[in-house]
Amino acid sequence: MANKSSQGNPQASTIPESGFLWGVSTSSFQIEGAAHADGRGDSIWDVYCREPGRVKNADTGEIACDHYHRYNEDVALMRNLGIDAYRFSLSWPRLLPKGRGIVNEPGLAFYDRLIDALLAADIEPWICLYHWDLPQALHELGGWQNRDIIGWFADYAALVARRYGDRVKRFATFNEPCVFTLFGYGLGWNAPGIADADALHKAIHHVNLSHGAAIDVFRSMIPQASLGAIHNRQPCFSAGPNPADAAAAKRFAEYWNDAFPNPQHFACYPPALAEAIEPFQKPGDMALIARPVDWFGLNHYSPHYIKADSNVLGATFGAPPPDVPRTAIGWPIVPDAFRDTLLDIKSRFGLPIYVLENGTASDDRPDSANQVNDAARIAYLQAYTDAMQEAISGGADVRGYFVWSLLDNFEWASGYSQRFGLVYVDFNTQRRIPKSSARWYAKLIATRRRCLVQPIARNSVDAAAAKR
Ligand code: IFM
């Protein structure tokens, strides 16, 4: 695909290419399907999808992209893109159907096959331990609200390290902890559908402690591992001119941007949360959370425009100003906010940055020649990679960029109604059609790789990890 002509013309880059990784990201529940195959247990999302009215069109993850059975085809799609790295998550209930205890060997073997196929295709596997599909059996024991989950998560991390640590060096603990805690426990918009202040604050603290515990497990079991967590970070602007909206935006930003990075990097909670979390804290907790990591994982799509609300956060999403362009699903397109976020991360955290999600949904459909011309996605990706370039020129230490997502997939409460893929998926036939943006991305990667100062060191770890 890299050699075919493509729409748009990716510009040459001055990105410092020594080790710069181009990639794509996915997550287990969103693509794997095979929900009952080979001993997999239920996750909270399987149960949530069965509850009437929770997910658009009553869509489920039962089949999704059937990646479980079609992973070889999907790895071939990635190889055609020319990517360096692939970030995916493991399905905790596929490995441990009850979340702890009995290990499911066929589940472990699936990821063996996937990892081996990636390595054979010269694609570096990046594993994320948790992308929202908590085993239902653990939820029934309290899930993220139960402090015992720190040990359950550490045991899961140890199983993963033991099994895959010989071939995989990049591990993230959590993807977007602010989203699954705020939406799942504070606002009731995602699984498990709880809207309760105490539930939210317990979940936040236990996720932070579980992160620290998993980092310790990986450090002790895989000395060369390169570790981090994946956070959302974006400016939260006031949606209106009144002081209540401005105060809501400030409060929301502390939950969205700081509830996880601040304790994980600076051993403290931001002011908006500190008092509410205090009852669930034990002496020594903050030191257990703030374990050194090797990089900052960033997911960024757009800034937020926030207004006051009566929910547990006192804040919710409002509309952007009318002159701000938006994607097909209404998310503001503001590449400058991406640049500023990267520069801000550089000054706050001083770590190498990997952009592990960026992309857009659009209403893609094949034309009569079975081509999917997603010009809007190309324009978005061009603008956002240009903004990343500006941030790098301004000093941000960005080491990689991963598009969300490889495939159209299950977009949580929106079901299959939002298509984020570089590759179109016909969910009736499972036919994959690379979109114009896939050809554009392949060309961008090939063009920028030609500018390499040094060859990419595949499977190398970050300098920070090597020095430790
Ligand atoms: O699909 C999600 C993903 O699971 C987490 N980050 C945002 C994506 C688009 O909404």
Image (cartoon, rainbow, N blue to C red):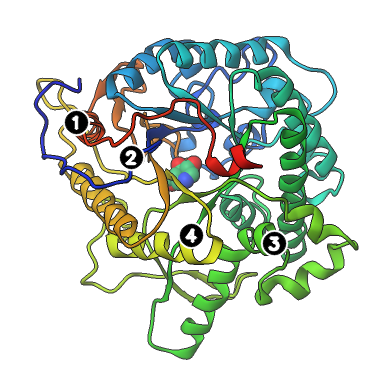
* Residue at numbered disc 1: 443
Q: Residue furthest right?
A: 283
Q: Position of residue 170 (x, y in %)?
A: 57, 32
Label 3 crowding class (10 Å Cα cut-off): few <14, some 14-19, many 20+? many
Asked if marks 2 and 4 touch (Cβ < 8 Å), the reply is no
- Residue 419's spot in the image, x, y percent? 33, 37
Amino acid on which disc 2 is placed: Glu
Counting residues from the N terminus, which is met first, the one under dot 2 or under dot 1? Answer: 2
Can you tell me whether the CB of the residue at mark 3 lies under 8 Å from the nearest atom of ligand 1?
no
Q: Looking at the picture, how far across and down is residue 313, in whole percent?
A: 61, 70
Q: Does mark 2 have its CB less than 8 Å from ligand 1? A: no
Q: Which residue matches tag 3? A: 263
Task: Characterize the local packing of mark 4: few (<14), some (14-19) or many (20 or more) Cα atoms within 10 angstroms.
Answer: many
Q: Secondary structure at mark 2?
A: loop
Q: Earlier in the sequence, mark 4 or mark 3?
A: 4
77 or 341, which is in the foreground? 341
For the point 48% across and 33% down, the residue is: 59
What's the residue type where badge 1 is placed? Lys
The residue identified by callout 2 is: 17
Q: Which residue is mark 4?
A: 233
Q: Are marks 2 and 1 in contact (CB under 8 Å)?
A: no
**Which mark is in front, 3 or 2?**
2
Looking at the image, tell me whether mark 1 or mark 4 is earlier in sequence order: 4
Note whether 66 is above or below 226 in the view shown. above
Distance between mark 2 and mark 4 Cα atoms: 24 Å
Determine whether, in the image, residue 254 is placed left or right of residue 144. left
Determine the residue positioned at 70% across, 13% down: 39
Badge 3 or badge 1: first in the primary sequence:
3
Q: Is residue 350 visible?
A: yes
Q: Nearer the viewer, mark 2 or mark 1?
A: 2
